[in-house]
Image: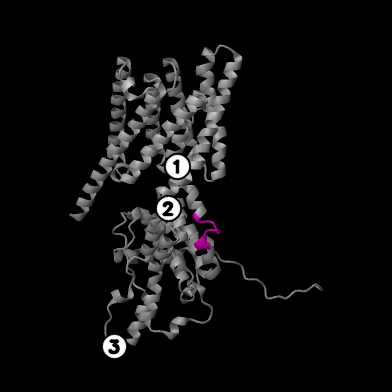
Amino acid sequence: MKKNKQTKGSYAAGAVMYVICTAVLFGVILLMMVINVGGGLSSYLQEDENVMRLVLVSVSYLILSGIMYFYFYFENKKYILYAGKVTEIFLILLLAIVFTYIIGKFVSPAARPVAFLALMSVTLFGRREAIFINIIYALQMFILDNFTSVTGLTANESYNFLILTFCTGMVAIFIMPRIKTRIGSVLVAFALLIPIEIIIGLLEVLTAEDIAGTLIYFLYGALGSFFSVLLYMFLLPLFEVIFSELTVFRLRELTSDQAKLIKRLKRVAPGTYHHTMVVAQISETCAQAIGEDSELARAAAYYHDVGKLKNPEMFTENQTDHNMHDEITPELSVDIIRSHTRDGAALIKKAHLPEYFADIAIQHHGTMPIKYFYAKALKMSDGELNIANYSYAGPAPETKIAAIVMIADAAEAASRSLTNRSPEKVEELVRNLIEERLDMDQFENCSITMGELTTIKLTIVSQLTGVYHSRIAYPKLKVSKRH
């Protein structure tokens, strides 16, 4: 019942924010119209033609805003359920319209950054949402171009720029997901030149009075392409920080060896670092195999064990011959071992890293028992023990990626104890690990299917047999320069 109330509250907050953002966006458009003619709002409204334009623009924008709301309501509610997402979408729309207005007015309509919104949308929201938002933006600009004097375009030119805005944005949407580095984003400007120059050539050359005017239009088109990418490169990092967006660029920066916690893990807990690298590789491949975000899975796996930085010597992978757990009670050992999930989340939050990473750090062991110390305590006890006192606090994985990291983490650690790492033995090990977690209800909250678990199992087996493949025995022969 509480969950339903929260959902209704979220819908209400999202709806209120949607209305506010719609009003702000229209207010900015109205301001541009007033500034363009000068004299203030009262003088602007004295002319009947201006009143009709204002009514037409108002109705058109309300219709487009309503269409966008119901699209997200039926297709992806998270964009209207949370006020932050609503604000983000409208802020991008607002910036795109303002930049288009300023550059179109003071430089040239052909130099407008018509691909800026598409680049931002596809990076932050995904391809399907970006396509729809690009359509809304193209129609909004068409309304401005055709029904107001803000942009100074003729009716025929407004239709030309509707095609230019839509087509250039679509090209950007289909190119950008292939780009994985910020430097690569710069090259998108050259790719955008192709549709811009072709469309300008087809639509504007026929109306050009001389060759010089045509060449200038082509030059402005190229400038518009670079303006789009320049604004995108400048503003995207701000959106990543303000709205906690995990873009592919930010994820790769967070998984660099120069990232603060990763660098510290490599220096202080080299065994955990190596374990983390293997788990990250496995998690990335598993996520890709079941259609999840592989970049996000890889990054989350990088940080799942950073809590071991607090007591690195208490974990097997960082120990040599001396095991400090031999000197303390099983109860104290359990407290130290299971605290690494909570410590990891605290370190992640302290470093101002994404909350999602902290969730994975806490959830990757779920509520599983720490069997080694539970068995050790049983041997030292005369009666039965409450296994909950020797288990992780949880919660169990709440996302499919958290489940993947849980399985990959356990499989990588357990496979180190295998003397025979044949595919059959590794498959048996991974199958038992998954079945054990199923029996312990570890996947109840993450909606992962049995088919996906089977795919994950096969993927992990393939990865582990590749990472820990058998090698030939080297001959026991000493050689020297004489040989």
**Of 49 and 142, which appears nearest the observer?**
49
Q: Left of 5 or right of it: where is 126? A: right
- For the point 50% across and 18% down, which residue is it? 203
Q: How is the image coloured?
A: one colour
Q: Residue 288: in sight, yes or no?
A: no
| Separation (CA) of disc 2 from disc 1 | 19 Å
Earlier residue among tags 3 and 2: 2
Q: Tag 2: Cα neighbours inside 10 Å, few (<14), some, or many (≥20)? A: many
**Residue 240 image offset from top left, x and y in percent:** 44, 48
Q: CA distance from mark 3 to mark 2?
A: 45 Å
Looking at the rendered image, the disc whose residue lies closer to the viewer, 3 or 1, is: 1
Residue 424 quadrant? bottom left
Q: Is residue 5 visible?
A: yes
Is disc 1 surrounded by few (<14), some (14 to 19) or many (20+) residues within 10 Å?
Answer: many
7 vs 246, left or right, is left
The residue that mark 1 highlights is: 123
User: Label 3, on which residue?
Assistant: 382
Q: Is residue 43 shown above or below 483?
A: above
Q: Amino acid at mark 1?
A: Thr
Secondary structure type for disc 2: helix
